Image (tube, rainbow, N blue to C red):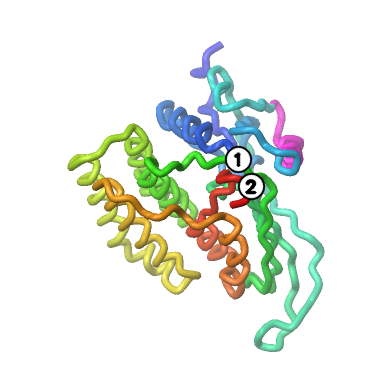
């Protein structure tokens, strides 16, 4: 029985720290078939796991798997052919019991302890961030590497593609799906080794569109350095496509050390943007 008899599958994609290559292959498959990824596990019965999760991430994935609606299918990056998924209503977020504490204005507000990751769309693979919220404002945060790899997918010759991947996920977190998809297409072109005037011109047009977006500037202005890092990424991509080499991204251990202080005082939605703009690569070896 062919897939034409079913609604188009919406896979929920989970990536281990060593699964970047698999994730890119899955994204290419979805693009080719016109499928859209699920944004929560409750939307679908199709789970796609990219890479080889370690014990802690595997446990988190198992929890997601048990909560997915039936009938359900679990697949690897190479198993997408011939599977179909259903749909379901939006996920209801569970949170811990709320206590109370004084906020900065002296009011008594609920205190919530909310984990982000490690199973979350457009999220750095292997990362968990634990937030303490009063209202929707982060009062404290902690960052933990629950899964790491032994070597980065993003080698020196893939610098432009690496930054385009980060830009793609940041734009999707910001809600600009079309621009995020365009960045992913440019990323995949860069991975083929294409250089010269044509890739540079295509990227320049994309960068102008992103740079001129008033909505994006408004959303990211003053939010944990997000806009500044996006601008830096766009400059680095343009230069990399011209053959210039840049210093590699900061070791993930350093990023995780400074992440909590950047999150404090941010709103919950802003916290996701800040994490996306730092984009630590936990696949880059256990020592960061």
Is residue 127 something that shows in the picture? yes
The disc placed on residue 108 is none
Horizontal and vertical percent for residue 243?
26, 46
Magenta-drawn segment: 58-71
Horizontal and vertical percent for residue 286?
64, 47
Q: Identify the residue position indicated by label 2 in the image.
A: 286
Q: Identify the residue position indicated by label 1 in the image.
A: 150
Is 66 included in the stretch rendered in magenta? yes
Q: Is residue 6 above or below residue 282?
A: above
Question: Given the current orientation, which residue lies at the most extreme top position?
Answer: 1
State left or right for residue 163 relative to residue 65.
left
Give the overall secondary structure of the magenta segment: helix
Tell me whether circle 1 and circle 2 mark residues in contact (CB < 8 Å): yes
Which residue is painted at 74% across and 67% down in the image? 112
Considering depth in this image, is 115 or 92 the residue closer to the camera?
115
Horizontal and vertical percent for residue 285?
59, 45
Element carrying mark 2: loop
Quarter of image, res 109: bottom right
Considering depth in this image, is 92 or 271 the residue closer to the camera?
271
N-terminal label among 1 and 2: 1
């Amino acid at each position: 029985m062919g897939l034409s008899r079913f609604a188009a599958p919406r896979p929920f994609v989970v990536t281990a720290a060593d699964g970047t290559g698999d994730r890119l292959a899955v994204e290419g498959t979805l693009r080719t078939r016109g499928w859209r990824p699920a944004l929560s596990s409750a939307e679908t019965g199709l789970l796609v796991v990219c890479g080889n999760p370690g014990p802690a991430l595997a446990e988190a994935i198992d929890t997601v798997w048990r909560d997915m609606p039936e009938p359900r299918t679990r697949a690897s990056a190479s198993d997408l052919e011939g599977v179909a998924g259903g749909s379901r209503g939006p996920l209801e977020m569970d949170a811990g019991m709320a206590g109370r504490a004084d906020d900065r204005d002296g009011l008594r507000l609920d205190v919530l302890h909310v984990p982000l990751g490690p199973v979350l769309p457009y999220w750095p693979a292997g990362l968990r961030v634990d937030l303490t919220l009063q209202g929707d404002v982060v009062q404290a945060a902690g960052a933990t590497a629950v899964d790491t790899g032994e070597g980065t997918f993003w080698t020196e010759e893939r610098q432009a593609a690496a930054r385009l991947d980060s830009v793609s996920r940041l734009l999707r977190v910001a809600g600009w799906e079309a621009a995020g998809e365009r960045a992913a297409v440019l990323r995949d072109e860069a991975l083929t080794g294409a250089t010269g005037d044509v890739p540079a011109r295509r990227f320049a047009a994309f960068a102008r569109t992103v740079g001129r977006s008033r909505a994006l500037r408004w959303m990211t202005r003053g939010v944990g350095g997000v806009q500044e890092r996006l601008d830096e990424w766009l400059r680095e991509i343009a230069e990399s496509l011209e053959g210039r080499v840049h210093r590699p991204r900061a070791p993930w251990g350093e990023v995780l050390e400074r992440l909590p202080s950047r999150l404090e005082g941010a709103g919950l939605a802003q916290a996701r943007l800040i994490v996306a703009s730092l984009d630590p690569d936990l696949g880059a070896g256990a020592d960061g």
